Image: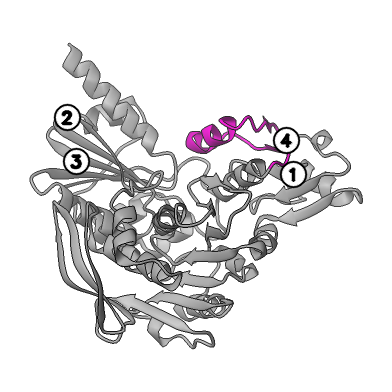
């Protein structure tokens, strides 16, 4: 039996679902967290318990979530102290698990989750494929050839992975509570890239990636000359993306897809590169990607009346910028009400000006303060006003009825709710308030 301590963590949930699909008995424990992750477990009947050291039994394989430690969790202590229990870290277990497949590890500061979903959508009908996505999605085929997984750099966890293809979307300093500076960050990605068994696939237009030292074959994708896979004749408008792909200077194919934004184009080029390396032709790739509908909490759209509601996981200034730019492209006739809740105090402090500059791209910028359960980091004592001091026109709202009523005053707009936290609950409350007003 596999028992997960912290089973509602997005990667943990995905892995639990994969092992269940492979026929193993699976259970776990956690505190209340993300509803959309929990639903994915319950649909398989995977039990979720409250923390109790008596849950740990002889003969179990216990997988310990990254945020759980002996000093603060009784189950972790019980598992580590029991000689009849095998214990694993999440990233350690995953590093061993992938060795039985042709594995593709999707890394990068931005776009990992969406790109992993894109790659899975492309590969799953080409050959049996299992997938682990950081939005809580996990599916397994018992006879899978491929394993596609989201590869997170936080605390260098991805250095436990040796995939066949090390894929990197981009590099921009993040997780400043762990990485010292950009050079430190780059060094970790360089090491990860060279863990590849077959090849590295990287964004060649990135300011950092082309300058890393690669010891494995590398394929670069992008818009600039010199990339192995290059997009030309790009059109990006409210109808979607249209572009030609050249590989080593020769036309590979033309693509016209109902997907939006230049950041999406870069993700697509990387996935096209993976498909090409595994023998797919352009017609097959275009047909598959034309039906890609996105992943959880990455530009998830609801259209109600003349308003549009977008839920997105964006938590870095560049990601917020991408979301707002995509919205301008998709909905050129509508004003944008952007609502952002920061998640980590270290990130909020380090990137305060960047958050303000990105949110200033919206017509009506709003912020929500750090959540009450945000981890307190040593030496950092700030609230959201540390960010809003750089954007005086912004407003701060609470995640309550009063905040929802204020936001609901707008009409014929696109609302964008952005945060790794459960900001989507405020979105739902705004929709509820608007429905009540219209019903009166």
Left/right placement of residue 154 relative to residue 241 reads right
The residue mark sitting in front, 1 or 4, is 1
Task: Report x, y in % for residue 49.
Answer: 69, 31
Task: Measure the alpha-carbon separation of dots 4 and 2.
Answer: 43 Å
Residue 25: within the magenta?
Answer: yes
Left/right placement of residue 191 relative to residue 351 reads right
Mark 4 Cα-neighbour bin, 10 Å: few <14, some 14–19, many ≥20: some
Mark 1 lies on residue? 2
The range drawn in magenta is 23-51
Mark 4 lies on residue? 51
Q: Residue furthest right?
A: 83
Mark 2 lies on residue? 409
Task: Measure the alpha-carbon separation of dots 3 and 4.
Answer: 41 Å
| Residue in front for this viewpoint, 103 or 331 | 103
Task: Measure the alpha-carbon separation of dots 1 and 4.
Answer: 16 Å
Task: Measure the alpha-carbon separation of dots 3 and 1.
Answer: 43 Å
Q: First in sequence, mark 3 or 4: give its number.
A: 4
| Residue in front for this viewpoint, 386 or 339 | 339
User: Considering the numbered disc 4 on the image, is that residue within a helix, a strand or a loop?
Assistant: loop
Mark 3–mark 1 contact, CB under 8 Å?
no
Displayed quadrant of residue 231: bottom left
Task: Measure the alpha-carbon separation of dots 2 and 3.
Answer: 13 Å
Left/right placement of residue 51 relative to residue 111 reads right
């Amino acid at each position: 039996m596999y028992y997960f301590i912290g089973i509602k963590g997005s990667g943990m949930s995905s892995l639990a679902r994969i092992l269940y699909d492979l026929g193993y008995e699976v259970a776990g424990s956690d505190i209340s967290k993300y509803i959309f992750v929990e639903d994915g477990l319950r649909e398989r009947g995977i039990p979720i318990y409250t923390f109790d050291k008596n849950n740990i039994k002889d003969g179990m394989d216990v997988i310990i979530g990254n945020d759980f430690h002996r000093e603060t969790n009784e189950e972790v202590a019980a598992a580590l102290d029991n000689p009849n229990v095998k214990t694993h870290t999440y990233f350690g277990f995953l590093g061993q698990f992938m060795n039985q497949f042709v594995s593709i590890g999707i890394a990068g500061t931005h776009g990992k989750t969406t790109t992993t979903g894109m790659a899975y959508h492309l590969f799953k009908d080409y050959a049996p494929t299992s997938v682990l996505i950081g939005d809580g999605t996990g599916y397994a085929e018992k006879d899978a050839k491929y394993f596609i997984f989201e590869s997170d750099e936080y605390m260098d966890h991805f250095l436990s992975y040796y995939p066949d293809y090390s894929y990197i979307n981009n590099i921009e300093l993040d997780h400043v509570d762990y990485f010292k500076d950009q050079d430190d960050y780059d060094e970790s990605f360089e090491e990860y890239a060279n863990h590849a068994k077959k090849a590295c696939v990287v964004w060649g237009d990135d300011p950092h990636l082309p300058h890393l030292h690669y010891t494995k074959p590398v394929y670069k994708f992008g818009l600039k000359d010199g990339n192995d896979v290059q997009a030309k004749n790009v059109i990006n408008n409210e109808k979607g993306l249209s572009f030609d792909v050249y590989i080593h200077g020769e036309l590979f194919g033309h693509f016209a897809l109902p997907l939006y934004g230049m950041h999406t184009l870069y993700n697509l080029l990387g996935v096209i590169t993976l498909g090409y390396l595994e023998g797919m032709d352009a017609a097959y790739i275009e047909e598959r990607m034309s039906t890609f509908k996105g992943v959880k909490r990455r530009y998830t759209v609801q259209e109600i009346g003349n308003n549009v509601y977008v839920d997105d996981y964006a938590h870095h200034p560049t990601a917020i910028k991408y979301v707002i730019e995509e919205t301008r492209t998709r909905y050129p006739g509508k004003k944008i009400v952007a609502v952002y809740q920061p998640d980590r105090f270290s990130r909020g402090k380090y990137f305060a000006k960047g958050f303000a500059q990105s949110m200033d791209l919206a017509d009506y910028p709003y912020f929500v303060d750090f959540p009450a359960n945000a981890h307190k980091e040593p030496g950092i004592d700030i609230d959201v006003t540390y960010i809003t001091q750089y954007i005086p026109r912004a407003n701060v709202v609470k995640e309550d009825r009063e905040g929802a009523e204020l936001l609901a005053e707008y009409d014929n707009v696109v609302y964008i709710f952005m945060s790794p936290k459960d900001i989507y609950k405020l979105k739902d409350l705004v929709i509820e308030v608007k429905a009540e007003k219209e019903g009166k």
